[in-house]
Image (tube, rainbow, N blue to C red):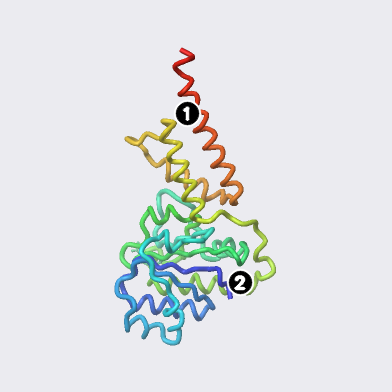
Amino acid sequence: MPRHIRIVLVETSHPGNIGAAARAMKTMCLDDLVLVNPTGFPHTEASARASAAGDVLEKARVVQTLDAALAGCVLVAGTSARPRALGPTPLTPRECVQKLLALSPHQDVAVLFGRERTGLTNEELDRCHYLINIPANREYGSLNLAAAVQVIAYEIMLAAGMSGAAMGSRPPHATVEEMESFYTHLESAALESGFLDPANPKHLMRRLRHLFNRAQPDPSEVNILRGLLSALQDARMHARKRGPQMN
Ligand code: SAH
């Protein structure tokens, strides 16, 4: 069982969809379900639709924020029925699952699913290394939430069965928390330096996020980047202190 793959449902409004998603997961040997601010959970309809996957529902963790849902993960894939203007190039489920399973089974990865009405927000997708689009009817390509979970879970099952030997061949990635601390550091350095204008930030931080999400640095690479930022910040501070003497 690919235990390190977490399914995250964001603000699901129909309890039946949560149950059906749990069932979709269990049929494909997945059991790590995280619910961000669900409406009505636990709920009899969720249990009814889960059928014999009640154990997956019972184990499901309910959290209030996406940060909490992604804690400990090193890769995040978001699913969307719609293309987005800014962000990773959409992958098919098969392409994306290959990338997720290339990691060591000890590294957690998450697949995010959005709200029934509005999907995932741009800010939520900005947290993702990959964007998955399930190819579907161009005129009506929005699957039911649990049906989308089923498609992805099936691809995970298929790929995990076939690529057992290849799994775990990649070096460890930095966790989501390590990357968030890095982005906070990067933003403060960009502000201090004047490179980032708070009055006119444009999409600078979003674009930098996508750049580093593509790079998928390991923890020691993140340390190098943070060390470099700190050194540049220190150098700037010293130059400022020295400034008046030199004039
Ligand atoms: N109207 C919403 C659709 C939400 S469907 C929108 O435009 O985004 C609920 C969720 O199911 C989506 O957020 C996504 O996680 C998943 N989903 C539905 N259809 C999908 C598709 N074709 N590809 C990838 N994910 C899909």
> Which residue sits furthest top?
247
Q: Position of residue 10 (x, y in %)?
A: 37, 65
Residue position for label 1: 237
93 versus 123 height, above or below: below
* Residue denoted by label 2: 160
**Amino acid type for the residue under numbered disc 2:** Ala
The residue under the point 37% across, 34% down is: 197
Three-letter code, disc 1: Met
Percent position of residue 177, x then y: 48, 54
- The answer to whether residue 147 is left or right of residue 105 is left
* Pointer 2 local density, CA inside 10 Å: few below 14, some 14–19, many at least 20: some
Q: Residue at x 49, y 64 (%)?
A: 110
Q: Quadrant of residue 21?
A: bottom left
Q: CA distance from mark 2 to mark 1?
A: 51 Å
Check the picture and name the quadrant holding the N terminus: bottom right
Whole-percent x, y for residue 218 in the image: 60, 51
Q: Ligand 1: does it lie within 8 Å of the C-beta at label 2? A: no
Residue at position x 45%, y 80% from top?
23
Q: Quadrant of residue 16?
A: bottom left
